[in-house]
Image (cartoon, rainbow, N blue to C red):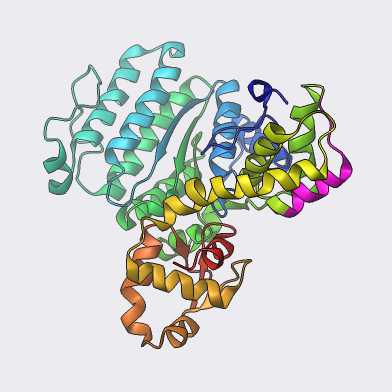
């Protein structure tokens, strides 16, 4: 098979050639946009799921849907040690630049841009040390007395309210997309919740669409008790069989290539329905297949190659970030949870390692911060990466 024509795309956040199995989420977002366009109240959205299920891909697709309806959009990726002031300022600046030319009062738009600039420049002492002279690239004077109090919650509410006003003036909306939302700092999480609450009460046409790991709802709930009612939560999981097959068949058909049923069976067993793995196994299988139709024998030949690539790029790159103590903790989790990576009790991990639970807290907390594990529920811990337990069992060192 011609590798140049290979349609599969196993990349981080890279849109697959066929976005299968996400019709329900896309339809739900269309309803949100339509309701807001008609002045109906709507909640912001939060996508949750393990790594490799396509949250970032879906987030980008939702953003495209908003853009196609003439909304202003901006996207950021949260980082554990970074305040949201600068990223949010840049994202809103982008959204306002999209909407600004359609506004009849450019002076009003400039005033809001001044608020964005004031918000961006009101950084904490820690942030100021990073780049004292950082500028948001806005060619208007910073506003005073608006979004510049230094209190993140107050400032974000004022900023988003003013930005939403620009969108409302032209009958449009703004969508702020936040990837890796579980990494937002606690004070900023509280501010986001407060801002979404205020905007919802105002009926303002601005929504936040977040994506993060399975414990993100708990992060939001710990910040504001009303967050459970504030967001609409969509759990993004692995693909059902029909969708996984379509993700493989549809791109191949466009290249006049077919799969035998046994090959599809073998690919589903290997990928387990996880979108990233579907693309990874599909890509290697295409490359090793001699001709169409692709057979189960082709899959059998490709599987070790695909697994080797995943071991380095998908699993190994994450494992290498862990310290010896953290690796010991993860290996114990793998032994207890088995190849499917079932959630395990933290107390059982301690017993397995012959240690007191308190002594293992630093390793566990560090793994959570690195995004390698998450607290599935109180007293439980699980891997954020599907099949990670299987990888660790095959690589004991």
Residue 104, given in percent of the width and then of the height, sits at 42, 11
Q: Is residue 94 above or below residue 215?
A: above
User: Looking at the image, is 118 positioned above or below residue 43?
Assistant: above
In this orientation, which residue lies closer to the viewer: 259 or 167? 259
Is residue 319 magenta-colored? no
Magenta stretch contains residue 261: yes
Image coordinates of residue 183 in percent, x first then y, are 38, 52
Q: Is residue 365 visible?
A: yes
What kind of secondary structure does the magenta stretch mostly adopt? helix
| Quadrant of the image containing the N terminus | top right
Q: Is residue 322 above or below residue 295?
A: below
> Between 113 and 145, which is closer to the camera in this rendering?
113
Judging depth in this view, the residue of 118 and 103 nearest the camera is 118
Q: Which residue is found at the position 39% from the left and 48% from the top?
A: 192
Residue at point 79%, 37% (across, down) = 246
Query: Is residue 240 visible in this depiction of the protein?
Result: no
| The quadrant where residue 275 appears | top right
- Residue 221 lies, in percent from the top left, at 46, 63
Residue 261 picture quarter: top right
> Which residues make up the magenta segment?
257-269
- Could you tell whether 325 is left or right of 196 in the image? left
Quadrant containing the C terminus is bottom left
Image-quadrant location for residue 115 = top left
Q: Residue furthest right?
A: 261
Q: Image point 58% across, 37% down: which residue? A: 10
């Amino acid at each position: 098979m011609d590798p140049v024509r290979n349609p599969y795309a196993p990349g981080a956040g890279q849109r697959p050639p066929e976005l299968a199995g996400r019709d329900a989420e896309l339809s739900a977002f269309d309803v949100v946009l339509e309701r807001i366009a008609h002045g109906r109240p709507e909640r912001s959205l939060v996508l949750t799921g393990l790594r490799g299920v396509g949250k970032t891909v879906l987030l980008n697709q939702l953003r495209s849907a908003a853009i196609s309806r003439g909304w202003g959009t901006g996207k950021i990726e949260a980082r554990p040690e970074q305040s949201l002031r600068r990223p949010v300022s840049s994202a809103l600046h982008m959204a306002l630049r999209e909407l600004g030319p359609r506004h009849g009062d450019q002076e009003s738009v400039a005033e809001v841009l001044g608020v964005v600039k004031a918000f961006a420049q009101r950084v904490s002492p820690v942030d100021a040390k990073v780049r004292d002279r950082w500028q948001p690239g806005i060619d208007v004077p910073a506003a005073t007395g608006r979004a510049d109090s230094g209190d993140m919650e107050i400032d974000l509410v004022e900023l988003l309210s003013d930005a939403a006003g620009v969108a409302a003036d032209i009958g449009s909306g703004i969508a702020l997309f936040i990837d890796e939302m579980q990494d937002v700092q606690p004070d900023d999480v509280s501010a986001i919740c407060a801002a979404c609450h205020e905007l919802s009460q105002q009926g303002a046409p601005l929504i936040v669409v977040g994506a993060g790991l399975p414990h993100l709802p708990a992060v939001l709930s710990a910040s504001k008790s009303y967050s459970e009612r504030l967001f609409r939560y969509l759990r993004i999981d692995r693909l059902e069989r029909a969708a996984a097959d379509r993700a493989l068949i549809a791109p191949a058909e466009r290249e006049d290539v077919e799969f035998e049923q046994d090959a599809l069976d073998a690919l589903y067993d290997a990928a387990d329905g996880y979108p990233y793995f579907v693309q990874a196994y599909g890509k290697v299988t295409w490359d090793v297949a001699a001709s169409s139709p692709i057979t189960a024998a082709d899959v059998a030949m490709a599987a070790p190659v695909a697994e080797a690539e995943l071991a380095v790029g998908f699993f190994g790159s994450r494992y290498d970030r862990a310290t010896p103590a953290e690796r010991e903790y993860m290996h114990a989790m793998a032994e207890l949870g088995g190849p499917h990576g079932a959630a395990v009790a933290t107390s059982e991990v301690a017993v397995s390692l012959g240690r007191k639970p308190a002594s293992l807290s630093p390793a566990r907390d560090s793994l959570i911060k690195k995004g390698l594990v998450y607290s599935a529920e109180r007293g439980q811990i699980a891997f954020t990466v599907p099949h990670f337990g299987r990888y660790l069992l095959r690589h004991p060192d």
